Image (spheres, rainbow, N blue to C red):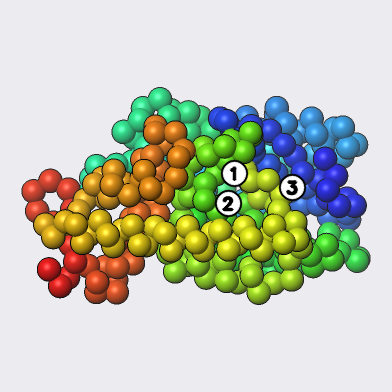
Amino acid sequence: MEIFPHIYQIQSLVGDRNLFQYLFVGDNVVLLDTGASYTPAEVILPFLQRQGIAPSHLTMAINTHADADHHGGNAALKESASEMLLACGDPDRAMIENPDHLFASRYNHWVADHGIGLSRFPEASAWVRTMAGPAHRIDLTFRGGEQITIDGKRTLRALHVPGHSDGHLALYDSANKAVFVGDALHGNYCPTTKGEPSLPPAYFAVLAYLGTVQFLEALEINWIYSGHWPVYHGAAAAEFLAECRRFVDKASALVMKTLERHPEGVTLLMCIDECGPAMGNWPANNQWLLMYPLHGHLLYLEQQGVTKKVKGEGYSRWKLAAQ
């Protein structure tokens, strides 16, 4: 679908959610995200064919961040577009290049200490492993601020928007006052195709995520396009940014109340069980994904000296430092 002149949204599905990539066409042809391992063959390449664009004309594909449904198509797309450059945010490079590192460092890194991670769900783990595709080299990395030329009149600016991942990127189109954020913003939940809650927000680092929200609020933005969420325009864009901030505030308050109820300390699993019902009404089998924001809040409190982490028998606990 053409959303602005020579800018296209490519739509498919991942589970019960939309999955979007974006194509910027000019003297250079730039693709934002490559989807899952099967997305190039099933979606992206047929879309290019319908637009009359040969794969050999792809200049660059940029991965917004390290998640299987956003870069798993790298190897497959490179097979059809051998001269295309693959790019990502510098801190995410190792995870994007190597699926084993992605799983160890992003999906299963809390299993030993907290008893929670993707490997606890074998069917889901196998599905995500398929989406991740084979290992493949990244050609160059961005840190934010780089200008990407589409043609003589149009450029995009790479933005560093961390929180969901350390190296998360977005693209800013100043001509259309549009920002293409991948999964940098989560609102109250990630929606199904019908707009119902599917997944909880998945920011990792509280201050980085709030910094991203503040950074985007300061830009002149009329449009927000993302990897899974509906398009937000005008006042709705500002409201979506405010919604992101309100969810963080709610989560922070719920974590503090949980800590106050348990002077003996709380594990991450306890925090998920106690905070989860008040945080949203996504399906119960996706509740475990609250490990990401809730660990972020517990870690932030630990870094501020509000809590201390206690390791003993069983899983690690956090308790209020004053208790």
Q: Are marks 1 and 3 in contact (CB under 8 Å)?
A: no
Distance CA(mark 1)–CA(mark 3): 11 Å
Task: Name the residue that disc number 2 marks.
Answer: 183
The residue carrying mark 1 is 70
Q: Residues within 10 Å of mark 3 (few under 14, many from 20)?
A: many
Residue depth check, mark 2 versus mark 3: number of the one nearer the observer: 2
Residue 230 in percent (x, y) is at 68, 45
2 or 3: tag closer to the N-terminus: 3
Q: Does dot 2 land on a helix, a strand or a loop? A: loop
Q: Quadrant of residue 88?
A: bottom right
Q: Residue at x 17, y 70 (%)?
A: 321
- Give the number of the disc on residue 210: none
Q: From this viewpoint, is residue 108 visible?
A: no
Q: Amino acid at mark 3?
A: Tyr
Work out which quarter of the rendered image holds the N terminus and state it.
top right
Residue 189, horizontal then vertical, whole percent? 52, 46
Element marked by disc 3:
strand
**Residue 221 percent location from the top left of the image:** 73, 66
Q: Nearer the viewer, residue 140 or 253?
A: 253
Nearer to the camera, 158 or 181 = 181
Whether residues under marks 1 and 2 lie with C-beta atoms below 8 angstroms apart, the answer is yes
Q: CA distance from mark 2 to mark 3?
A: 13 Å
In-front residue for pair 78/110: 110
Please give the residue where the numbered disc 3 appears in the rendered image: 22
Point out the tag, 1 or 3, that comes first from the N-terminus.
3
Q: Position of residue 187 (x, y in %)?
A: 55, 53
Residue type for callout 2: Asp
Three-letter code, disc 1: His
